[in-house]
Amino acid sequence: MYTVSFHAAEGTDNHSSASSNSGAKGSAKSISKKKKYKTESGAMKAMWNWLNANKGSVNYFSPHSMPQTFTDSNELPYEGTKTETDFYRTAKWLRLRTTAFEQFGNRCACCGATPDTGAVLHVDHIKPRSKYPHLALELDNLQILCEACNMGKLNVSETQWR
Ligand SMILES: [Zn+2]
């Protein structure tokens, strides 16, 4: 079980819809709440959304690590699923994506796989968006990778293959 406690800076908790059973002992004015999640990604998603919507901090208790405190969604080891989807749907990104394929060709910059050989090609951020959001729409920061190479890379490597 993953537990997150949310601590809103006074008067900024917009999440009035959240119902918490564990807040019974707190005073009515308490602006902290605690929630439990079955999955790590569920907890991450909740913290991401909350930190984007509120000012304050969250404490994260996981069975796998020491308790952690986050005050900004950028500190989370996670890129919000929703934000992710939204970004890849923006007209700016879709235009840039096409430009990247035109510029770099329809093949994996790492292993050379092409759609002809069954590869699914992705436009990859060399420097990950999670760490370098300002480079998200820079053509120079893009490369074409096949799904296998892209998965292998994750956000750990910042190797420029092309
Ligand atoms: Zn590849």
Image (spheres, rainbow, N blue to C red):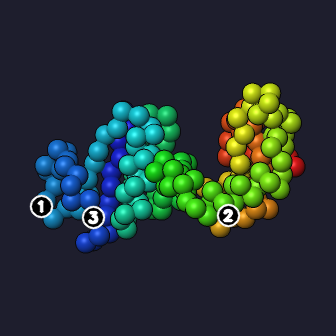
- Left or right of 62 on screen, residue 102: right
- Total marks shown come to 3
**First-in-chain label (1 vs 2):** 1
For the residue marked with disc 2, what is the amino acid?
Leu
Q: Nearer the viewer, mark 3 or mark 1?
A: 3
- Left or right of 9 on screen, residue 99: right
Q: CA distance from mark 2 to mark 3?
A: 31 Å
**First-in-chain label (3 vs 1):** 3
Q: CA distance from mark 3 to mark 1?
A: 16 Å
> Quarter-wise, where is residue 139 in the image?
bottom right
Residue lying at 12% horizontally and 61% vertically, measured from the top left: 28
The numbered dot on residue 28 is 1
| Towards the viewer: 125 or 9 | 125
Q: Secondary structure at mark 2?
A: loop
For the residue marked with disc 3, what is the amino acid?
Asn
In the image, residue 39 lies at what x, y percent? 41, 34
- Any atom of ligand 1 within 8 Å of the CB at mark 1? no
Q: Nearer the viewer, mark 2 or mark 3?
A: 2
For label 2, the residue is 137
Q: Nearer the viewer, mark 1 or mark 2?
A: 2
Q: Is residue 112 above or below residue 49?
A: above
The numbered dot on residue 14 is 3
Q: CA distance from mark 1 to mark 2?
A: 46 Å
Q: Secondary structure at mark 1?
A: loop
Q: Residues within 10 Å of mark 3 (few under 14, many from 20)?
A: few
Q: Residues within 10 Å of mark 2 (few under 14, many from 20)?
A: some
Q: Are marks 2 and 3 in contact (CB under 8 Å)?
A: no
